[in-house]
Amino acid sequence: MKKKKVNETVQMIGSFPPKKEIFEFTSPYEEVLTGEANTKPYKGIAQFSDDDGRILLDLNYTFQLVKEWKD
């Protein structure tokens, strides 16, 4: 299967000291493709790094776009 890069976003979410409270981040809204391209599963990668460029967390995930969630 041929892979195609759809989008790449690099976003700084801030600099935060360690604390007991959970930090929550919601990414900005983005438009999605229409048609056949949006029915296939997508693969994503999220990385969190420090100011020195060390990767602290590396997440690989998959998702699929749907019009409505099924219960």
Image (tube, rainbow, N blue to C red):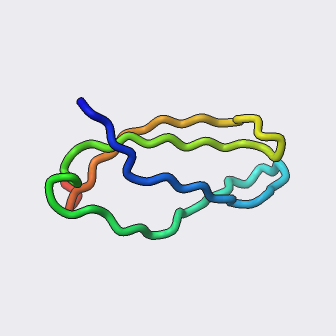
The quarter holding residue 12 reads bottom right
**Which residue corresponds to the image point at 66% horizontal and 43% vertical from the top-left?**
48
Q: Where is residue 54 drawn, in percent x and y?
A: 76, 35
Total numbered labels? 0
Q: Where is residue 52 drawn, in percent x and y?
A: 83, 41
Residue 15 or residue 22, whichever sits in front: 15
> Viewed as shown, does residue 46 lie left or right of 12?
left
In the orientation shown, which residue stands out farthest toward the left?
A: 36
Residue 20 or residue 67, whichever sits in front: 67
The quarter holding residue 26 reads bottom right
> Viewed as shown, does residue 58 lie left or right of 61?
right
Q: Is residue 39 above or below residue 60?
A: below
Residue 17 or residue 34, whichever sits in front: 34
> Viewed as shown, does residue 42 lie left or right of 39?
right
**Which residue corresponds to the image point at 80% horizontal and 57% vertical from the top-left?**
15
Whether residue 71 can be seen here: no
In the orientation shown, which residue stands out farthest toward the top?
A: 1
**Which residue corresponds to the image point at 60% horizontal and 60% vertical from the top-left?**
25
Residue 23 or residue 44, whichever sits in front: 44
Whether residue 17 can be seen here: yes
Q: Where is residue 51 drawn, in percent x and y?
A: 82, 47
Q: Where is residue 18 drawn, in percent x and y?
A: 82, 48
Q: Is residue 32 above or below residue 1?
A: below
> Viewed as shown, does residue 41 lie left or right of 24?
left
**Which residue corresponds to the image point at 22% horizontal and 57% vertical from the top-left?**
66
Q: Quadrant of the N terminus?
A: top left
